Every structure is written in C-alpha cells, then in structure tokens.
C-alpha cells in the first residue's frame, strides 16, 4: 500500500481549519448581534415603561394637590377665615408647587425615556455593525485560508510553477 502524499492532506487541513474558523467567527458575531438586538428591544420597552410611570406619577401628584386644596378650603371654611389675603396666598403657593412637581415628574420621565431610547439605538447600531461584519469576517477568513492553501500548494509542488 502506497503512502498518501502529505502535502495535499496538509492543504486540506488548512482549508478545513480556515473554514471552521471563519464559520465560528461568523456565528459568534451573529450571536452577538442577536444579543444586541434583544438589548435594543429591552431598552425600547424601558422607555415606554418610563413614560407610563411618569404619567402615573403626574396623576398621583395632581390628585394629592386636589386633596390638599380641598383640605385647605375645608379648614379655612371651618375656622371662618375668608379666602383672601394670606390664606389665598398659601393656597396659590400650594397650587404653584403642585404644578411644579407635576412638571418635574413629566420632564424626569421624558428624560429617562430618552436615555433608554438612546441606549437602544446604540445597541441597534452595534447589532447592524456585527451583522455586516460577520459576513466580512467569514469572507476574510476564507480568502486568507485560500491564499495560504494556494501558497502551500505552490511550495510543495502540488500545483505546477508557471
């Protein structure tokens, strides 16, 4: 039985190694892209939740302000104080503070939602880059492998020199 020439075997193993490496890079990058896409979706959901929580907080603050105004009016009425001068100023200050608190809650919720959306966009861009890069990584690995195999074939005489 004749021995197999080692050069073709070595070239075949080089090609197989490059192919496995390229496919591994491709699959790793696609997996990372999928994870980034999932994170982007989570961030978008967080943005929606932040806005909802802001709406709930604003509603709670409005209800508290209405309740405070009602208590103030009831106490002033019970005590016989007329709603003018200092009592009216106190109620006005309470209303101003309540409106300010509602505005702060609204802006805070919007700010948080925008932060989540921005982070989601970053993840989404990363996913796009990884998806595009996966094909390039596979192609680059295959080209490098092909060049190495060709060079080995030329050096070992498997391919004729021209």
Image (spheres, rainbow, N blue to C red):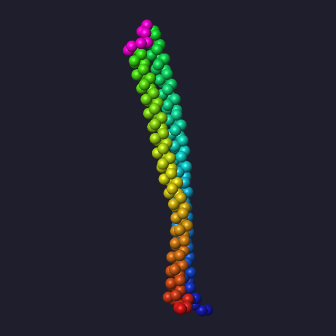
Residue at x 55%, y 52% (from the top left corner): 38
Q: Residue at x 48, y 38 (%)?
A: 109
- Would you say residue 82 sits in the magenta stretch? yes
Q: Residue furthest right?
A: 1
* Residue 14 can be seen, yes or no: no
| Residue in the foreground of this view, choosing between 66 and 142 | 66
Front one among 115 and 25: 115
Given residues 9 and 145, the one toward you in this image is: 145
| Residue located 50% across and 57% down the image | 126
Near-viewer residue (54 or 28): 54
Q: Is residue 125 visible?
A: yes
The quadrant in which the N terminus is found is: bottom right
Magenta span: predominant SS is: loop
- Give yes or no for residue 159 being in the magenta stretch: no
Residue closest to the far front: 85
Residue 89 percent coordinates (x, y): 40, 18
Is 78 placed above or below 57 here? above
Percent position (x, y) of residue 142?
54, 74
Q: Identify the magenta region.
A: 79-86
- The picture places residue 44, in percent across and down from the top left corner, at 53, 46
- Image point (54%, 79%), residue name: 146
* Residue 32 higher or lower than 92, as above or below: below
Q: Give coordinates of residue 84: x percent, y percent.
A: 41, 12
Above or below — where is 122 with respect to 10?
Answer: above
Q: In the picture, residue 159 is in which quadrant?
A: bottom right
Is the residue 78 above or below the residue 56 in the image?
above
């Amino acid at each position: 039985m004749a021995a197999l020439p080692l050069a073709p075997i070595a070239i075949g193993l080089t090609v197989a190694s490059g192919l496995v490496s390229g496919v591994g890079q491709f699959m790793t990058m696609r997996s990372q892209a999928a994870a980034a896409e999932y994170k982007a979706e989570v961030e978008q959901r967080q943005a929606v939740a932040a806005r909802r929580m802001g709406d709930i907080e604003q509603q709670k603050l409005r209800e508290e302000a209405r309740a405070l105004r009602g208590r103030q009016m009831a106490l002033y009425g019970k005590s016989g104080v007329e709603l003018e001068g200092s009592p009216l100023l106190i109620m006005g200050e309470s209303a101003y503070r309540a409106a300010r608190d509602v505005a702060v809650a609204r802006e805070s919720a919007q700010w948080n939602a925008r932060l989540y959306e921005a982070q989601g966009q970053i993840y989404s861009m990363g996913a796009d880059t990884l998806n595009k890069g996966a094909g390039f990584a596979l192609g680059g690995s295959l080209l490098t492998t092909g060049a190495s195999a060709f060079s080995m074939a030329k050096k070992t005489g498997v391919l004729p020199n021209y």
